[in-house]
Image: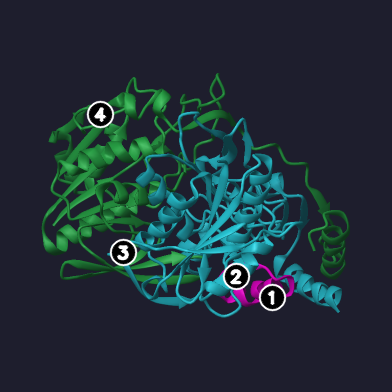
Chain colours: A green, B cyan
Amino acid sequence: MNHIVCIAYVPDTETKIRIAAGGVSIDEADVKWIVSPYDEYALEGALQMKEAKGGTVTALTFGPARADTGLRECLARGADDAIRIASEGLGEVDSLGVARLLAGAIKALPHDVVWMGNKGVGTDAQVLVPMLAELLDLPHVNLVTKLEWKDGAVLAYREIEGAREIVEMPLPGVIGATKGLNEPRYASLKGIMAAKKKAIAVKTPADAGVDPVTVAGEAAHVRWTKLELPPARQAVKLVPGDDPAKAATELLRLLRDEAKVL
Amino acid sequence: MANVLVFIEQRDGKLRKSSLEALSLGYSLSRKISGTLGAVVAGSGISSLSSELAAYGAAKVFVADRPELALFSSEGYTAALDAAASAFKPSIVLVSATAMGLDVAARFAARRGVGVLSDVMTLDVENGRLAGERPVYSGKARVLVTAAPSAGIQVATPRPNVFPASRSDTPGAGEVVNLDLPALKIRAKVVKVEAAEAGEIDVAEADKIVSGGRGIKGPESWPMLRALCHELGAALGASRAAVDAGWIGHEHQVGQTGKVVSPSLYIACGVSGAIQHLAGMGSSKVIVAINKDPEAPIFKVATYGIVGDLFQIVPALTEAAKKLKA
């Protein structure tokens, strides 16, 4: 089976976010970048399937040159190939634009399973998995926490609000992975050495069959117009904790009478 | 015509509260643009839902009632939304940002070649264009996103539990339009739904959350926290440390690699407040921190704090809450 894993290269979850001058993007100085944790579950899922049943794993991203480091991490963990659709010079591209670029690249590759995390931890739009499936005319299951493989199909357990859905999906299809699916591996030293020798294919939007003017800048349907840090919260009001019963009564009084949330 | 169409989620014939929130929001937007409010609902044996939707202001209710739509299907439900949009010609489409809603909204948007204002916590319309704020970088920043003038149909997915659900002052006509769907192409099929344990509220939908972190010391402390949840009608949350230690399932995790939540009350018990956790719950209206370490970062975002032994304070809170109700 041929697996395509789409990854996002995003600020480390430990990173403190600062707003850049201009107020519509983050200050990238001092930001450490990582493969989005959810995409790591997707990669691990693909690698486990390849080990069990054979096939290939291709890591794919849309981004600037720094994302090559993320692709190399995927190669080090066991991906066979890596492709980056270059974002340099394009300007703002919204989720639909990214989905169209990824779908364009995927159409040119043999694919049985397309994988992705259910969301990034960057722009967090949570719409790429269904968008990609729609553009590729494939079925999809999102928020997958467990998989059982069948002949030509997959049984996917997905987390929804207050319940779990078990979905049977014929392949080819798109899987949106989330936490719980597996424990992502670390790259081995051997893997890291081997990854250094592998080439990353850098493609233009045109290579992916997409005219950049149809997805970027003025063509983006959803625009970032202002980026801000969350408003600062008021200083904490401390309730003395030495007498638990008193503390509990006083806290509930505050929650009911002052904050009015009870 | 400036119509607003809202996709309504039902499970087992019951309307989801998050969809009624979206419908209420749709009603106020439709008033603002002098348009008509429509609702679309898919399922099997669901025609009785239309009067409730009318009470929230829906002038038209598009119904896709088919046996094969009894359980959720992203392809089937998207076909219903698409058919309703073709009939109603909305300029705005709203779908609550739930697991189901995001599937349907994103597929619909891709089919129509438009974007999505996703997971917005505010939403307004100016000069016919939607604009709303949403959390990015897992809540560490918030961005104002705006639909471009060229955008065609504007699709937005309001975050559950943020917008109020209220019946409109003047009910809509609720005229039922049965959708005549083309042959459905349903490939991914739900074969089974396993409900969560009875009485459990999902953290993503909860108005109140009681959450435990490393400080609760082990899974044997959950009954103590659950007792408080029960008294307050709260959902049980957990920090990444508690989930990664294997004390509880990931569905309870709040934070950057868990769920990003915005309840009216969040009580953090023995949660130190790692940056990822704060990102995931920082937009809660009121935050209570109970921790023995006065230096714990959770106190920096807390509205109220108790420095003390949670193993004494949590049971005392449960008792006091019982008395409050009595």
Res B201 label: 2
Marks 2 and 4, how far apart at CA: 45 Å
B137 in the magenta segment: no
Which of B100 and A80 lies nearest the eye of the viewer?
Answer: B100
Res B184 label: 3
Cβ atoms at labels 3 and 2 below 8 Å apart:
no
Asked if both marks, 4 and 3, belong to the same chain, the answer given is no
- Tag 2 secondary structure: loop
Marks 4 and 1, how far apart at CA: 54 Å
In the image, taking residue A143 as reference, residue A52 lies left or right, namely left
Confirm whether residue B285 shows in the render. Answer: yes
Which of B8 and A31 lies nearest the eye of the viewer?
Answer: B8
Cβ atoms at labels 4 and 3 below 8 Å apart:
no
Marks 4 and 3, how far apart at CA: 33 Å
Marks 2 and 1, how far apart at CA: 10 Å
Residues shaded magenta: B217-235
Q: Which of marks 2 and 1 is nearer the N terminus?
A: 2
**Residue A199: where, in percent of width, then height?**
14, 33
Q: In this view, does A150 lie above or below B254?
A: below
